[in-house]
Image: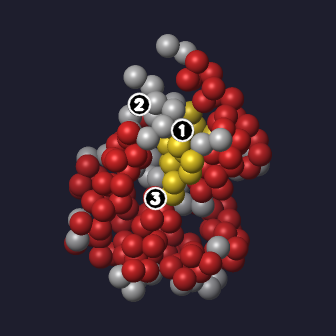
Amino acid sequence: MKKQIITICGGLGSGKSSTAKKVAQILGFQHFSSGDFFRQTGLELGLSVNEINKRAETDPDIDYRTDEKLRNMRNAEKVVIDSRTAYHWIPESFKVYLDLPSEIAKTRILNSIKEDKLRQRSEQVSSEEDIYQKMSERFKSEQMRYRDLYKINNADKSQYDLVVDTNKNNLEQVVDIIVFEYKKWIAEN
């Protein structure tokens, strides 16, 4: 049974949060970011996002805390979730993957950090090279943990209802594509 839930996954810097916020706004849905939830958990523990990722490699309770929140959202309606694992926990959702080459992602991440106070406190980076290195470490850590904990590979695009290239499409185009395809998907039986 289809749910009025959109789950948005993608590589680092692909625009998950920005896209999810705008899609939620247009549809009148709520928005939830597991990345923000994870960052806040790190700050509560006095850790940067990279430090909490490293700790999560040996302490699965860190991932379980975020994933419990996501599993509980399965009962929600009219929500857009940006997360690397929500598609797995809510298979009845409209599953979107945002695709972006990592070389382009590092510049986008730096710009995003400059505009977001939570990310400034949790990311603790200063240059594009530093961002790219930490971004790569974080992605590898997450992929390893998701594979070990849940036997999933969120970069396998075949498990999504829609894949959107965020390099070829600007934010407004990406949002329009998702809203259009979601409405078509939810209308189908």
Residue wearing tag 3: 34
Q: Which colour style is shown? A: secondary structure
Disc number placed over residue 23 in the picture, else none: none
Query: Which badge, 1 or 3, is on the more N-terminal residue?
Result: 3
Task: Tell me the kind of residue under disc 3.
Answer: Ser
| Distance between mark 1 and mark 2 Cα atoms | 13 Å
Q: Position of residue 117 (x, y in %)?
A: 62, 78
Q: Is residue 60 above or below residue 80?
A: below
Tell me if residue 119 comes above or below residue 90 in the rendering: below
State if disc 3 and disc 2 touch (CB < 8 Å).
no
Residue lying at 57% horizontally and 48% vertically, measured from the top left: 30
Q: Point out residue 89 in the picture as x, y percentages from the top left corner.
A: 35, 43
Which picture quadrant has residue 108? bottom right
N-terminal label among 2 and 3: 3
Q: Residue at x 46, y 34 (%)?
A: 93
Q: Are marks 1 and 3 in contact (CB under 8 Å)?
A: no
User: Marks 1 and 3, Cα distance to the nearest angstrom?
Assistant: 16 Å
User: Would you name the residue on which mark 2 appears?
Assistant: 92
Residue 67: percent from the left, percent from the top?
A: 33, 55
Residue 37 relative to residue 174: left or right: left
Q: Is residue 5 above or below residue 19?
A: above
132 left or right, relative to 68 = right
Front residue of 105 and 25: 25
* Label 2, residues with CA under 10 Å away: few <14, some 14-19, many ≥20: some
Q: CA distance from mark 2 to mark 3?
A: 18 Å
Return the residue at label 1: 78
